[in-house]
Image: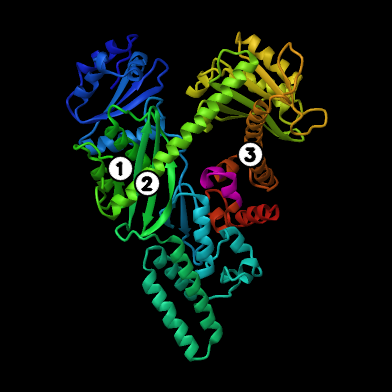
Amino acid sequence: MSIPCLKKGVEIIEEYVKTLPDTPGVYRMLDHRGDVLYVGKAKALKKRVKNYTQTARLSLRIQRMVAATTSMMFVHTQTETEALLLEANLIKKYKPRYNILLRDDKYFYYIEITKHPFPRLGRHRGPQKQSHQYFGPFASSPAVYEALESLHKTFRLRPCSDTFFASRKRVCLEYHLKRCHGPCVGKISQDSYNECVSQTIAFLKGKDQGLQDELARLMSEASKRQDYETAALYRDRIKALTHLQKQQTINVSSLQDADIFAVAQEGDETVIQAFFYRQGRNYGSLNLFPQRMNEEDFSASLETFLALFYTDKTPPREILLSHALPEHSRLAGALSQAAQHKVTISSPQKGEKALVMGQALMNAKEELARRHASHLSHQQNLKNLATFLGLPALSRIEVYDNSHLQGTNRVGAMVVFGDHGFDKTAYRTYKIRTPALLHGGDDYAMMREVMTRRFSPKETADTLRILPDLLLIDGGIGQINIVQEVLTDLSLHIPILGISKGPDRNAGNEQFHRPGMPSFDLQDRKDLLFFLQRLRDEAHRFAIGAHRKKRDKQLTFSKLDEIPGVGLARKRTLLQYFGSAKGVADATPQDLAKVPGISANLAQHIFDLLRSTR
């Protein structure tokens, strides 16, 4: 339901209140462009939305949100639980600037066992397939790599991709290192391999004691029949298993399948320390940094954060919090419904769980103190640079760099630095669209296109409507002049600073450029020199990464162009089916043949050609 109207703020909200029922639901507040400002849930929509008309009781931030509201949308639900789940999904989808958001919204790491006659054991990060089995989450890449290292030594399941597996004619190095049984060339039967798979799954599900007893029995039997080579194999597996148990076990017997969240907050900064326990093992910890948690209604904000956190993750059976949720919270029921098993949420006050919570809370407070000190350092760097350049203040610096390989796969990149350091949610890449530049080497024309697109009035992303206080350009006076021309044409007045390598192109001898001023160096201001080098290097890293991704896709599709019978329509179908160019390159002939319009012969041709490029 929406009411198109030229009114805004309290006046428009009052119009909606007249027609709203006192039933559960979710509401969206929209600005004049139709962008979602805020997503909220309510047990009774009429009462909840009416609160926004009482501006004297609202914080300054919410008053600004109400003032910007020109329309609202509503979805009615049967229960408050449904409203809670829908609210989390809509926040995830629209990322409204007035809602709680996770700054790092990436997937966690899992150990994956694939569905295959000879399953693969490896690391996974991203959407999960129902046919595969996943164990985790692990809080970091090193944690999952360390676990996989021991698992491969213990159970020797293959780590290679299906494409690599299907193309092998002889064993690879993993077999000789005793990290794989070599199923690709028949070094182990399928039944024996599946036994190893079952043992791996049993261990990852926490049934390791029974597994260790079974291995000890098999070792003893092999020894009695004087099959010492097999006995030694079981002995080595028991040793590796013991090492893995020591590596992952922590002495908290009461935690089997649980997530722990300890919250520390000061001002507008919030740190949540999360610990993950699965099958009684500590799978690591992670610091999360939600934005805009409401100090005035903190427990409700925590509830929304948790609902958002678990929108794409299966919640464990137990969730422990440092702060209690509201008494009327329906979160446990909503998560139980989503997970299809009972989920309990509590705030432990005594016993082992309380001790672990205390440790997590201490870590959260220490991380908050470190971030506060880091932010002070960032703010001091910005203040020093502003003073040196004669600017009133700096709170947002945009840094630009270009990347290409002999004029091909050209990409422009923008990184953003502010009071809290690098803001990776605001990073952007610009694929060059100008036909004359697609295969050319005109860096000036490329910079002109990037600047024109960045500051065009047509830019719609929220983060790009904010103008920077300074542009830092990786380039010399030529690039600076181009940027100045674009800004002048758009009637914008933004300070510009260029950074280029010195005469010997050595780091530390950089030259700096400003429009209409002589070039200079910063040999006598090492603090500013190191700060600007760091900004330039981050832009360079980001630009090269974007260029490599574009180049890898181009290599795959250029090879597809060489195959008779694969035109634009089939290339598009392949991309849609596998999700990416890498997915096409990793597919087996059997997988390729499942794509509509791809015959078995064509699938084999595609597989052979893409494999030859590796």
Q: Is residue 436 visible?
A: no
Q: Main secondary structure of the magenta part?
A: helix
Please state which of residues 607 and 594 is positioned toward the viewer in this rendering: 607
Neighbour tally class for label 1: few under 14, some 14-19, many 20 plus, Cα within 10 Å: many
Coloring applied to the structure:
rainbow
Residue behind mark 1: 322
Secondary structure beneath label 2? helix
Residue 247, position as x, y percentages in the image? 46, 62
Q: Which mark is residue 360?
A: 2
Say which residue appears at 32% left-offset and 9% top-offset: 7
N-term-proximal mark, 2 vs 3: 2
Q: Are marks 1 and 2 in contact (CB under 8 Å)?
A: yes
What range is drawn magenta here? 575-585
CA–CA distance in space, label 1 to label 3: 39 Å
Nearer the camera: disc 2 or disc 3: 2
Residue 220, position as x, y percentages in the image? 45, 85
* Amino acid tagged 3: Gly
Is 614 colored magenta in this rendering? no
Say which residue appears at 69% left-offset and 12% top-offset: 485
Residue behind mark 3: 545
Say which residue appears at 63% left-offset and 15% top-offset: 495
